[in-house]
Image (tube, rainbow, N blue to C red):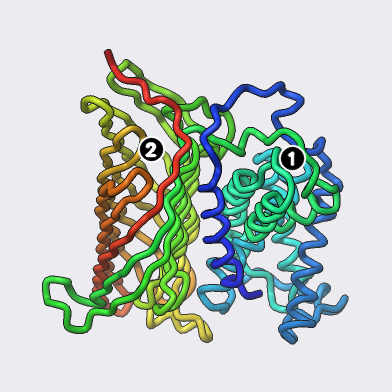
Amino acid sequence: MKPLRFILPLLAAISSTTTAQHIPREPLPDSLRCGFCPRPKLPVAIFEGFLVNAVVNRFNVWVLRDSLFEVTPHSWRTNLQRGWEFDKDDFLVNMLGHPYNGSMYFAAARDNGLGFWAGAPLTFFHSVVWEYFGETTRPSVNDLVDTGLGGIALGEMFHRIAATIRNNEQGGGSRTLRELAALPFDPVGSVNRLVRGEWGRRGPNPAEHRPVGTVLRVGGGVGLVRGPGSLLGGLKGADFSSILFADLKYGDSYTDTLRKPFDAFSARLLLAPGHGGLEQLVGVGRITGTEIGRTEWHRHQLELNQRFEYLNNGALQFGAQTLQLGLSSRVHLGGKFWLRTLAAADGIVLAAINAPGAGVGGRNYDYGPGVGGTLTAGIEHNGTPYLILQYQPAYVHTLNGAKANHLTAFSSIEANIPVLAHLTLTIHSTYYDRLSKYADGTRDRRRFPEIRVFAAYKTAHKAAVEQPQ
């Protein structure tokens, strides 16, 4: 597979949502809230998962000419007899390609009327099927986790983004363009809609189409990476790169009533065309939560979130599947200004981190679980963030790779300066600090600072933000 083939269409697809006009959302009858969503069809969802595996396998054999996918009954029998291992695939394939493939398993469930909790086990089921029957190598533990958890996170976010891009109430050429723009996010759903004749048929939109509290920013700018060391040392050795980005805040637990997983999530995509391509894809979705305190001046919620991370800026590689439990708060500062905070504990199910001493075939990164935390504070005006500070430490213990413990810390500060009604100037700075302690007593300390400056086009679908009296 070539996962990067969907990245540029992905950016264009997100941008297409900015053309929609603000239309107050009116409650729909329960019979219409799913739009064209069919009744739950578990057998069809299972069959389409098998079909995804078959198509991916044949693509690798017939198009990529990769002999590792030339499966036979003998390879199936051998895989069933052998135990599981950590594989040697490169970072892009394992940390992005497999989650994207898993998102198609999840999409098969969601498009056939199944909910989040029904789609999750099916994603793991089809990942197991692939590991035993889709390739000739031994079943891979890391693929199961990354395809399963990563596929669930990306699958639900992509399912909702595709629903936002599509507009069942439109017709003609604009309708077709929207259906095509949704294709990279939800290829399974797009093909199903085409077969069912829904690319042109008009009808109600699903509830996911216009989530209250959504803010989308797309744009571009320039980034500066100092490399190992410090920006205080001057610009010598610094690496400049153009940046394209998309930033989506979907839904809002403080301005809308959330009932289902990922009714609220945030996602950020960064592309550095001259600096390795995809630099960052991070998404955090709210699985469930409960309100634990509320007045007209402040609200507090206990949240369980799921986070998907893919970071690769040439000097740093870090990817993880994480579950997060935290306390989020919203406090009124005055006028239309609010303070938002999050204090959370992170359980890292599995992380990949680049390490020169990994020594696992051609693989140059370690695998292991870990723990960490997230501290975020931001000032927003009428639902739009103006200033955001974040600190995210983590500890990763290597299970496969070099014998090491990795201590990492991500720090960031971002300022969004309004220029025009829909135009903002964004200044974003990150600092990555890592200390790796190896079993032989050696230590490896790395620091990677980066500064980015963007011009961003912003659109929003916000409910009126209540003001204390």
Callout 1 crowding tier (Cα within 10 Å): few <14, some 14–19, many ≥20:
many
The amino acid sitting under disc 2 is Gly
Q: Residue at x 77, y 39 (%)?
A: 202
Residue 124 seen in the figure: no
Vertical relation: 90 (above or below) 466: below
Asked where in the image residue 382 lies, by quadrant, the reply is top left
Q: Residue at x 71, y 58 (%)?
A: 187
Whether residue 169 sits left or right of residue 43 in the image: it is left
Instruction: Give the mark nearest the N terminus, 2 or 1.
Output: 1
Closer-to-camera residue (141/298): 298
From the image, tell me which residue sits under label 1: 114
Vertical relation: 374 (above or below) 6: above
Q: Position of residue 260 (x, y in %)?
A: 59, 33
Split into 4 quadrants, where in the image is the N terminus? bottom right
From the image, tell me which residue sits under label 2: 326
In front: label 2 or label 1: 1
Whether residue 259 sits left or right of residue 130 in the image: it is left
